[in-house]
Image (tube, rainbow, N blue to C red):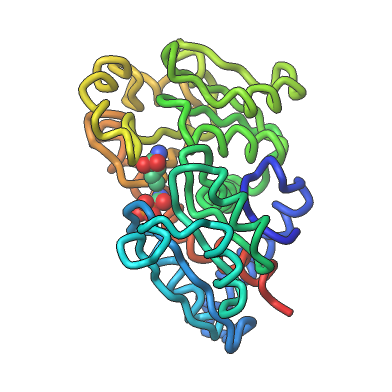
């Protein structure tokens, strides 16, 4: 594994290796055991969109691993003034040991990897959010013990989160059901991938059908970064696609709730359900740190 561009490229074995290492790094951090695997290394972090968790977890994670992280905003880089990705990739490869990028087009991430010579990590594109799903899977395994026999459901927009969750959950052996309105379905590449999983994957417009007997209930914002202009249209389209008491009643009694954050209370999730499951949701946020440290060690350690 040279890069983390999208989960479609990563095998189940590689996902489990990352999760096992993440568990170990979390244990070591909790017990004050140093793990400076990336001493002297530098990670460049390109942000073309806003971030709280991704920036903080990569930056502090790199520090804990003995290296440094450089925050590179689109506003400051020449890439924001039109310098081609091909050139940026070749320049950065001569200074750094890895690149994390959050941007719009998946192709830009793929191009960085193609033209550069150092590992590239996708910190979210319009297509996918692999780092988040590694943290989500880590959180599920922590709470439920294993993935065997579990069903996850996603309620809402067939967006970057949905695309990555479908691939990640199916690859580790979970069943997956998604409820989204017509016109807001997951990417066709992901639906093609899911075809191979037969009835382990279902796509419906019926929220309660998707949530039935789910062990893990997941949602995300109705309007993602870059879709601010569609807010009103999306609010109308997603009315009813909300994680609320009705959805939780359809799910298993011991179902956990995940949300990548930021959350919009009373839109995709009620404040009540959010607060009742806040421990899980903030553990998920914490696990971004441990999962990404594992990714960086796997990709960047000599
Ligand atoms: N979940 C997530 O990626 O959060 P940020 O947008 O704050 O990085
Ligand atoms: N779907 C959201 C995820 C944010 C972490 C977005 O892309 O804005």
Residue that appears at 52% across and 65% down: 88
Q: Does residue 126 appear to the left or right of 137 in the view shown?
A: left
- Residue 272 in the image: above or below residue 118: above
Which is more toward the observer, 121 or 276? 121
Q: Give the residue displayed 51% in from the left and 18% down from the top.
A: 210
Residue 94 picture quarter: bottom right
Q: Is residue 289 above or below residue 65?
A: above
Side (left or right) of 177 relative to 1 = left
Position of residue 134 measured from the top left corner of the image (x, y, whole percent): 58, 51
Give left or right: position of 268 versus 151: left
Q: Residue at x 54, y 85 (%)?
A: 66
Q: Camera-side residue: 99 or 148?
A: 99
Spot occupied by residue 168 in the image (x, y as percentages of width and height): 64, 40
> Is residue 279 among what the camera can see?
no
Res 122 visible: yes
Residue 26 found in image quarter: bottom right
Residue 190 found in image quarter:
top right
Q: Left or right? Give the position of 148 relative to 161.
A: right
Q: Split into 4 quadrants, where in the image is the C terminus?
A: bottom right
Is 54 rendered above or below residue 246?
Answer: below
Above or below for 22 versus 37: above
Judging depth in this view, the residue of 106 and 37 nearest the camera is 106
Query: Residue drawn 25% across and 34% down?
Result: 228
**Residue 13 locus on image (x, y percent):** 78, 51
Residue nearest the observer in this picture, 193 or 278: 193
Number of numbered callouts drawn: 0
* Residue 122: percent from left, percent from top: 55, 53
Q: Quadrant of the N terminus?
A: bottom right
């Amino acid at each position: 594994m040279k890069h983390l561009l999208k989960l479609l490229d990563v095998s189940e074995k590689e996902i489990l290796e990352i999760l096992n290492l993440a568990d170990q790094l979390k244990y070591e951090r909790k017990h004050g055991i140093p793990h400076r695997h990336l001493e002297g290394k530098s990670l460049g972090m390109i942000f073309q969109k806003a971030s709280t968790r991704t920036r903080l977890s990569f930056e502090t994670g790199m520090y804990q691993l003995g290296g440094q992280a450089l925050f590179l905003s689109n506003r400051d880089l020449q890439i924001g003034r039109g310098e081609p990705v091909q050139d940026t990739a070749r320049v950065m490869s001569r200074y750094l040991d890895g690149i994390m990028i959050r941007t719009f087009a998946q192709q830009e991430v793929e191009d960085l990897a193609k033209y550069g010579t150092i590992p590239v990590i996708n910190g979210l594109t319009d297509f996918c959010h692999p780092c988040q799903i590694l943290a989500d899977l880590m959180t599920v395994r922590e709470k439920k013990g294993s993935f065997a026999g579990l069903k996850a459901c996603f309620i809402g927009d067939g967006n970057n989160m949905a695309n990555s969750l479908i691939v990640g959950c199916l690859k580790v052996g979970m069943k997956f059901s998604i409820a989204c309105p017509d016109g807001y379905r997951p990417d066709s590449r992901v639906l093609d991938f899911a075809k191979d999983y037969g009835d382990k994957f279902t796509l419906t417009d019926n929220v309660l059908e998707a949530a039935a007997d789910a062990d893990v209930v997941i949602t995300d914002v109705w309007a993602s970064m870059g879709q601010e202009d569609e807010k009103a249209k999306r609010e109308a389209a997603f009315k009813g696609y909300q994680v609320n008491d009705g959805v939780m009643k359809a799910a298993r009694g011991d179902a956990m709730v995940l949300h990548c954050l930021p959350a919009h209370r009373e839109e995709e999730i009620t404040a009540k359900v959010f607060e009742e499951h806040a421990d899980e949701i903030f553990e998920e946020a914490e696990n971004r740190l441990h999962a990404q440290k594992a990714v960086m060690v796997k990709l960047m350690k000599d």
